[in-house]
Image: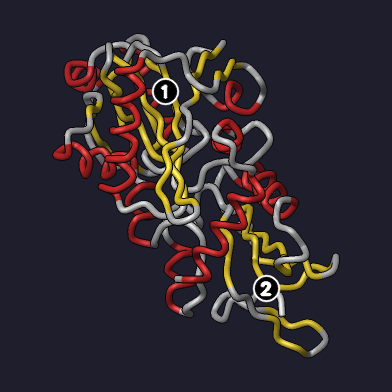
Amino acid sequence: MKKHIAVVMGGTTSEHAISLKSGQVVMKNIPSDIFDVTAVIISSEKWIVNHLGQEIALDKNRFSYLFKGKEHTFDAVFIAVHGAPGENGELQRLLERIKIPYTGCSAEVAALTYNKYKTLEKLQPYGIATAKRVFIDKNASWSSDTLIDAVGLPCFVKANKAGSSFGVVKVNKATDMAPAIETALKEDDEVLVEGFLSGTEVSIGVIEYKGNVIVLPPTEIITNSDFFDYAAKYEGKSEEITPARLSPIQLENLNAAALNVFHTLGVRGFSRSDFIFMGDTPYFLELNSIPGLTEQSLLPMQAKQAGIALSDLIVDLINNCLKK
């Protein structure tokens, strides 16, 4: 009998629409002769199951649903939720409590990697280069001058817990600081102010595939925007070159840093990390524990470059979580 797999998508943040696209790509790439697949769509208002074209409420406490008087349960969950509750550990904690296996990292690791500041603090003792930074929350007292003294100009103001460049603003002058922080606080109640790094920007995936941890070919990001923002990521306003045009020493250093990040943080399944090169040194920016899987997303492009079909990767991720 085929295993019943839930592909969970959507979420409660600004990344909801992007997650729906990733989830649909995952659905299309799971062979129906291997698994029985059902979409679970999360929004701020409700969690629903799409069962044979009908929308049915999901019982979150049991992670199951009723159809014609019969309870339908899941053997495993493929998490394709960007943002909360998929990347911050909430969904993972629920599934761990009711003992349903799922793809990706644990609830503890998801909560850590969703927090940009805590991730940077965790990595710094392990030889990972990072930019100067200051953390503030919505109740903190701050001044533009103090922040600029700490990280310099230009700098980036980022929502501490958000993705897809939502709540990210590049600050070029002191008068930009307050509006930038206000923008970031619309996405999260914590803000990271980070020094600007000028260099080649790259993104690199690391996956667990067929029993091995594999570093994928990196992608070089050339953006027509001021930085790799939402428009650059999803509206074609960037050039993405895979594999990235790096020197042998740069590639060696990047691969080592990506592996170091993956293992130090305790990531599982797959992830994508962003770096900027200063000379031959890759400076870590952030890690995405549930990378985008849309047609425009980087990790599928990198896997293809490595000779790994997206469908094969997805099936392997599901099989791995079923074993665990």
* Figure colour scheme: secondary structure
The x, y position of residue 35, in whole percent, is 70, 67
For the point 58% across and 30% down, which residue is it?
Answer: 305
For the point 54% across and 22% down, which residue is it?
Answer: 242
Left or right side of 2 for 84: left
For the point 50% across and 66% down, which residue is it?
Answer: 321
Left or right side of 251 for 70: right
The x, y position of residue 185, in whole percent, is 41, 37
Left or right side of 92 for 235: right
Q: Which residue is mark 2?
A: 4
For the point 52% across and 42% down, which residue is it?
Answer: 291
Vertical arrangement, residue 307 with respect to residue 234, above or below: below
Return the disc, 2 or 1, that comes first in the chain's sequence.
2
Q: Amino acid at mark 2?
A: His
Q: CA distance from mark 2 to mark 1?
A: 47 Å
The quarter of the picture where the C terminus appears is: bottom left
Res 125 quadrant in image:
top left
Vertical arrangement, residue 59 with respect to residue 83, above or below: below
Foreground residue among 230 and 307: 307
Q: Which residue is mark 1?
A: 179
The quarter of the picture where the N terminus appears is: bottom right
